[in-house]
Image (cartoon, helix red, strand yellow):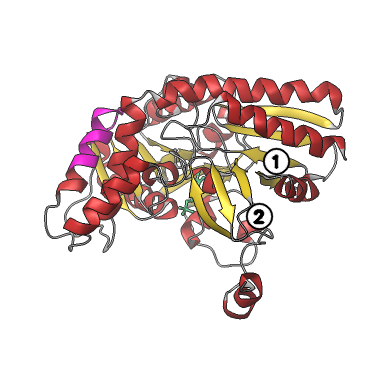
Amino acid sequence: MTDWPELEHEYFMNVVERLPLTIVRGKGARVWDEAGKEYLDFVGGWAVNSLGHCHPVVTKAITEQAQLLIHTSNQFYTVPQIRLARLLVENSCLDKVFFGNSGAEANEAAIKLARRYGQLNLDGAYEIITTLGSFHGRTLAMVAATGQEKFQKSFPPLPTGFVNVKYNSIGAIKSATTKRTCAVMIEPVQGEGGVNLPDDSYLAEVRAWCDQKGILLILDEIQTGIGRMGTLFAYEQYGVEPDIMTLAKGLGSGVAIGAILAKKKAAVFAPGEHGSTFGGNPLACAAGYATLKFIIDNDISGKVKTVGQYLSQGLEKLKPKFPFITEVRGRGLLVAMEFKSDIAPSLVTACLEGGLLVNQLKPNAIRFMPPLIIGNGEVDEALGILDSVLSAK
Ligand SMILES: *Cc1c(COP(=O)(O)O)cnc(C)c1O
């Protein structure tokens, strides 16, 4: 067999610490390596494989679209783009859509839109308030938006116009708001930063503050959206409506797509002010449409709520047996387990050997983001592997 890791080390820029597994095939919530060993996938491509691997409705949609039309320039109308935009609008509180290719790109578009809004309506206000511990992507502007030093420190100077304030503190947002502020951008639940849930009232307070000041509320639902939290969008659970929302990860079941959605009043781009060569191409939109339609028609969000509770309860039950587990937190199928010490790296490797993929969230925490289509049986299986791995600690 080819030594793929060795070949990669020769040719590839190493930006991610790889785990010792080369995945060659996937089906549902499972993946296989070259030797045919099976793994239960509770990473889900970092919350991307919403319908699992190679779901028949997605594979069919991509295959059919690939035989019909893969790409045109965005000067022309294409059917999948319009169908997906309509489906998103009809199932959210937003009115207009634009497609890009990734989360960071969607957030960049949101920032441009908010600045343009500030230019038109807020006397040139351009500053965006974001939160510490957030994650908004890897482009330079999104690194500046992301309130984490580890992502920022290697790349000065960073673009200006971002203020990072304490998360889950309405007071911090209020004190950072000036006449230069045009928007607040937050993740309803911080994903990459730790699966940090805000107080129930936080988002409503931010919404009220934005209304009072006439500034925009941007919700980055790139990780929390598309059913992951047990509702189609996380904002539904907090009783707020954003002016702008960004989506990506779970939208295309693995085909690269990002989306920015805006209320009518915030959809201020004029022709020529924004664009994308690949964004909204027929192939990606066909994948997005098939994914979203399946999730809506089969109430996958409702099922996520139930199976997510089952997962969280199962993880909670491990606590008395393993007192070094300090916390289980999350909602739906975005759940973290935290430990007293930095055991996550060895735990992730041991789970891998046991046939379970989990994500290291921090040195002392792991994260579960399985496909949204898993059932209690798969949860039991994952809990069983985790239990035996923790027993060996
Ligand atoms: C993953 C993520 C991004 C960045 O998405 P990319 O597709 O990697 O650019 C932005 N915001 C949140 C909340 C994310 O989880």
Label 1: state its secondary structure: strand
Identify which residue is drawn at 64% across, 75% down: 9
Judge the density around disc 2: few (<14), some (14-19), many (≥20) Cα neighbours within 10 Å: few
Boundaries of the magenta span = 83-95
Residue annotated with mark 2: 149
Q: Position of residue 359 (x, y in %)?
A: 65, 46
Q: Position of residue 204 (x, y in %)?
A: 47, 22
Q: Which mark is residue 366?
A: 1
Q: Report whether residue 161 is seen.
A: yes
Is 94 magenta? The answer is yes
Indicate if the residue with disc 2 has its beta carbon within 8 Å of ligand 1: no
Q: Is 143 situated left or right of 70 in this image?
A: right
Quarter of the rendering occupied by the N terminus: bottom right
- In this rendering, is residue 199 above or below 213? above
Disc 2 marks a residue whose amino acid type is Glu
Q: Nearer the viewer, residue 184 or 154?
A: 154
Q: Is 55 situated left or right of 314 in this image?
A: left
Disc 1 marks a residue whose amino acid type is Ile
Give whichever of discs 2 and 1 has the lower sequence position.
Answer: 2
Identify which residue is drawn at 43% across, 19% down: 239
Quarter of the rendering occupied by the C terminus: top right
Q: Is 370 situated left or right of 55 in this image?
A: right
Q: Quadrant of residue 382?
A: top right
Q: Position of residue 5 (x, y in %)?
A: 64, 70
